[in-house]
Amino acid sequence: LSGLLCSRVNVANIHPGYLGADFQLTPNPHAAVPLPNGFRLDGTYFQFAESKEDYTVTPVETAFTPSAEA
């Protein structure tokens, strides 16, 4: 398992301003096949930092940047 991708949007929750803004991506730091470096989706990416005894997990917001073609 390289990572976990989830979304909290459902009929009871408020929908984001655009499709995909609700994604939450967490990489698996022990994956045999890790996510590629720099792989991000719009939403929240949970960045891991490993120390001798534990992990530090930091949420990083990824903003939507519209393309010139849109």
Image (cartoon, rainbow, N blue to C red):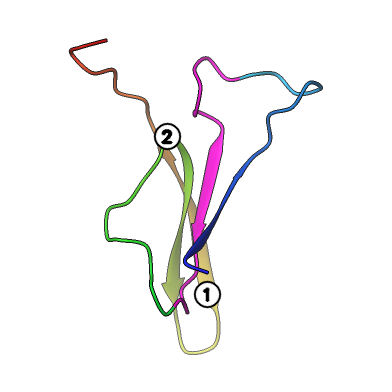
Vertical arrangement, residue 34 with respect to residue 45, above or below: below
The disc label shown at residue 11, or none: none
User: What's drawn in magenta, residue-wise?
Assistant: 16-31
Find out whether the residues at labels 1 and 2 contact each other: C-beta distance under 8 Å: no
Left or right: where 39 falls relative to 26:
left
Identify the amino acid type marked 2.
Answer: Asp
Q: Nearer the viewer, residue 66 or 32?
A: 32
Identify the amino acid type marked 1.
Answer: Tyr
Question: Horizontal and vertical percent for residue 25?
Answer: 50, 50
* Residue that lies at the very extreme toward the right in this rendered image: 12
Vertical arrangement, residue 3 with respect to residue 22, above or below: below
* Residue that lies at the very extreme toward the left in this rendered image: 68
Vertical arrangement, residue 7 with respect to residue 63, above or below: below
Q: Nearer the viewer, residue 59 or 41?
A: 41
Question: Horizontal and vertical percent for residue 11?
Answer: 78, 21
The disc label shown at residue 42, or none: 2
Q: Quadrant of residue 12?
A: top right
Left or right: where 36 falls relative to 32:
left
Residue at 70% x, 19% y: name it.
14
Question: Horizontal and vertical percent for residue 35?
Answer: 37, 62
Residue at 23% x, 18% y: name it.
67
Which residue lies under the disc numbered 1? 55
